Amino acid sequence: MHQTSQAFDAQVRVLECRNCGAPGTMQLVDGKFLCAYCNAVNLCILPSSPPAPTQGEPGDHAAAATSADPQAARLIEQQLINPKRIAWVRSEVAKPGTSLALDISANPPVDLASMATITSWTTWISTWLPALREHWLKALPAAGQSLTDAAIQHRIYWLALRLGQAYGIQARHVVKPEEIEDSQLRRRAVLETALQHLESTPYASVLRCHLSRAASHAGDLPSARVWLGRCPPDGDDLEVDGEIRIALAAIDATEGNLEGICQILEPGGDEVPFRSEELTLDALAYRIHAHEQLGHGAVAKQLLRSALKDFGFSRVFGRLRMERIAPRARHQLGLRIVFKWLAIPALVIAAVVTLIYMLG
Ligand SMILES: [Zn+2]
């Protein structure tokens, strides 16, 4: 189901060169790295290295942020399926107000709002990608400069996620393995470059979740777990909770742990709600995948109907393709497209034949 790539290997750092923009696997010496493409020396912000989080020490976000313990993801999963945690999510989602600070679809920087809507990724990339890169390069702080302005933090986060999505799409539309790897490395570099500037903010956890999901899609499960394991195990941000749930579902899907997907997204058969529309769609997509692969055809069909009703054909089909899950549902939806295109010439032929008959 998934290609194998080392582009998201969590044991190395991949950053963008500030001079030429090339992604590079960095050998860090004294907080600097040398770009292999243009020989520029880049300054790098290095986080301190506190110990890995352990059970019974909740709230140690700094420790979680930089640890590389593959078991940390298991600890996070245990916390997220805890009934008390699920009850907390339900009560938070039920509260009035729809603050979505971390959802890039709902919350673009004002001057970039025209770039926020995507109906076709191919059109979007050809229209906006060069301009987006210019905004990205302008927004990044100068070497060695710390980033404290909240608006600029959000801007860098938004640009990094959008650029990362675009590079991820590009990786699917090229054929040569080296071109696929290059696009994946660009995606990795833009996300990790943003991460290095946003380390102490809630944005860091979402960036790690996206790196984890990308590693899962690339078939690199050890890295997917390490990226996720660096998120806070008991954070109190509802949006981050949702992002971690979906990243865990992506890990479970890649390793074929279908029960795990159900545990994290619908414990006891009762779906976990999300405030974000995008995460709601992600969760539905993974639940459809889990049930169809478990042989629960009727449940999978019911979930697919519900997803189509709430989100429409193209968003549901696009999401299943993007996540590379639910092959039966994708096949079924793909047939609808084929029948739709066959129906048009058939109707034209029928109309012509009828006209000839009437005139004759
Ligand atoms: Zn360079």
Image (cartoon, rainbow, N blue to C red):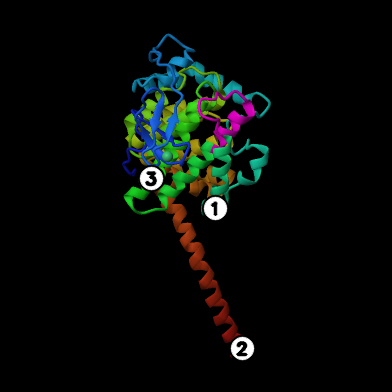
Contact flag, marks 1 and 3 (Cβ < 8 Å): no
| Element type where label 3 sits in the image | helix
- Residue underneath mark 2: 359
Crowdedness near tag 2: few (<14), some (14–19) or many (≥20) residues, C-alpha within 10 Å: few
Question: On the image, which quarter does residue 141 sit in?
Answer: top right
**Residue 291 found in image quarter:** top left
Dot 3 crowding, Cα within 10 Å, few <14, some 14–19, many 20+: some
Q: Mark 1 points at which residue?
A: 120
Question: What secondary structure is marked by label 1?
Answer: loop
193 or 118, nearer to the observer: 193
Q: Which of marks 1 and 3 is nearer the N terminus?
A: 1
Q: Where is residue 88 in the image (x, y as percent from the top left)?
A: 55, 19
Relative image position of residue 352 (x, y in whole percent): 56, 80
**Quadrant location, the N terminus:** top left
Q: Residue at x 53, y 77 (%)?
A: 349
Residue under circle 3? 182
Which dot marks residue 17? Answer: none
> Where ligand 1 lies, by image quadrant?
top left
Q: Distance between the residues labelled 2 and 1?
A: 43 Å
